[in-house]
Image: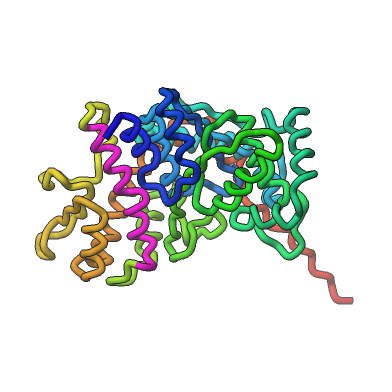
């Protein structure tokens, strides 16, 4: 393989879909470093599903891609008004702390990343004029269709939700990216951007998508469903309880959030750490999820008592999936391996939280406790 092919493979590996890959290939052939952006709207508490895109960002950086992380505060406010703008500003700070801590825990050099807050440029005259130009070209039907998988759908949608896809398309131009990276649920917005930006005289960008991580209950992992997700700051006891209660039917590989988490998060991170070890870049707290004495090709190990056959070692996810399907790997052992790996993965993130007063204050400001409404005084009987 040529150098260009090796770099392109690194940029696009482990993705569900790539649109416009030739754009990236041509830049690499010209000897240029592609630019990309990944955006997140600071609404609910970020959860372990964020490991999927943040692990992929490690590949981008290693491939020489210039990565911008967009903290999309305006988008968060527009998405069916999930939070008042004042609260969103605090959540921007919290997300910034969390993302940096997660990337450091994975082993991603955050010095090479650029963080941008959406309102820093989305409130400018030029951006707003482009937004008005876009509104004059896009129908209500197309805007609603584009945001169907991302914007919360209600019976009587607000105008704010219809603006969401157009703003995300404009972000590609204003952030100067060559491709946008996001989840597969963003596909309709990505194709919307490809169709609309040229109408404004801007070039069409490429789009890279990672698969969506299923929740622990089997559906999409969501911040709004506490039973389907694990927060980055959940204690080891909470992690154990949630994984213990997760749906993980013996032999079922079609609907299995625990098995999907191994595939999408734990094995990619373990491989990333093995690669860093081989390059002499790994630190002691960034060891792969492999037990001592495991065969050289192992990428994931599960501790199991000797009376039940001893430790289990896997050189690929496919091997693990096959053994689970054949009922050689019991759901209880799988959950034990996932729990051990996840707790070790969350430990440095939680230590960063405990050591940083600003991080802690950002969490309090971003997610203040719900205050129950005052109880009405009982009227005295006359």
Using the rendered view, name the quadrant where residue 133 is placed.
Answer: top right
Residue sitting at x 29%, y 48%: 267
Q: Nearer the viewer, residue 76 or 91?
A: 76
> Residue 250: x, y in percent?
29, 71
Please check the rendered image and state whether residue 269 is part of the magenta-colored stretch, yes or no: yes
The quadrant in which residue 28 appears is top left
Residue in view at x 75 percent, y 28 percent = 126
In this image, 269 relative to 376: left or right?
left
Q: Is residue 264 above or below residue 217?
A: above
Q: Quadrant of the C terminus?
A: bottom right
Q: How is the image coloured?
A: rainbow
Instruction: Using the image, determine if residue 124 lies above or below residue 207.
Output: above
Instruction: Give how far across and how far down residue 42 sits, in percent.
Output: 59, 42
- Please report the residue visible at 75 percent of the width from the left and 38 percent of the height from the top: 131
What span is colored magenta in the figure?
254-277
On the image, which quarter does residue 117 sit in? Answer: top right
């Amino acid at each position: 393989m040529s150098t260009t092919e090796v770099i392109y493979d690194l940029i696009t590996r482990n993705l569900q879909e790539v649109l416009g890959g030739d754009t990236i290939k041509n830049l690499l052939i010209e000897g240029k470093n592609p630019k990309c952006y990944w955006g997140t709207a600071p609404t609910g508490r970020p959860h372990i599903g964020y490991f999927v895109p943040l692990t992929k960002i490690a590949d981008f950086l290693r491939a020489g891609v210039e990565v911008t992380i967009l903290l999309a505060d305006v988008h968060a406010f527009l998405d069916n008004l999930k939070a008042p703008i004042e609260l969103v500003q605090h959540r921007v700070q919290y997300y910034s702390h969390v993302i940096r801590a997660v990337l450091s825990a994975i082993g991603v050099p955050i010095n090479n990343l650029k963080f941008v807050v959406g309102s820093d440029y989305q409130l400018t005259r030029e951006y707003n004029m482009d937004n008005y130009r876009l509104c004059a070209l896009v129908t209500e039907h197309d805007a609603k269709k584009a945001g169907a998988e991302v914007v919360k759908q209600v019976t009587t949608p607000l105008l704010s939700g219809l603006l969401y896809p157009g703003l995300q398309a404009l972000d590609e131009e204003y952030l100067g990216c060559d491709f946008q990276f996001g989840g597969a649920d963003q596909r309709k917005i990505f194709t919307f951007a490809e169709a609309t930006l040229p109408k404004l005289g801007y070039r069409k960008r490429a789009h890279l998508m990672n698969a969506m991580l299923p929740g622990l209950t089997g559906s999409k992992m969501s911040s709004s469903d506490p039973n389907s997700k694990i927060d980055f700051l959940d204690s080891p006891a909470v992690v154990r309880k949630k994984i213990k209660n997760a749906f993980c039917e013996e032999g079922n590989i079609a609907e299995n959030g625990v098995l999907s988490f191994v595939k999408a998060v734990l094995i990619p991170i373990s491989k990333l750490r093995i690669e860093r070890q081989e390059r002499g870049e790994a630190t002691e707290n960034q060891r792969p999820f492999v037990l001592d004495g495991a065969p050289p090709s192992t990428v994931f190990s599960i501790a199991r008592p000797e009376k039940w056959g001893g430790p289990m070692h896997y050189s690929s996810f496919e091997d693990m999936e096959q053994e689970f399907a054949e009922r050689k790997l019991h759901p209880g052992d799988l959950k034990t391996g996932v729990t051990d790996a996840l707790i070790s993965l969350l430990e440095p993130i939680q230590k960063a939280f405990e050591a940083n007063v600003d991080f802690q204050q950002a969490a309090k400001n971003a997610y203040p406790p719900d205050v129950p409404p005052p109880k009405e005084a009982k009227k005295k009987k006359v």
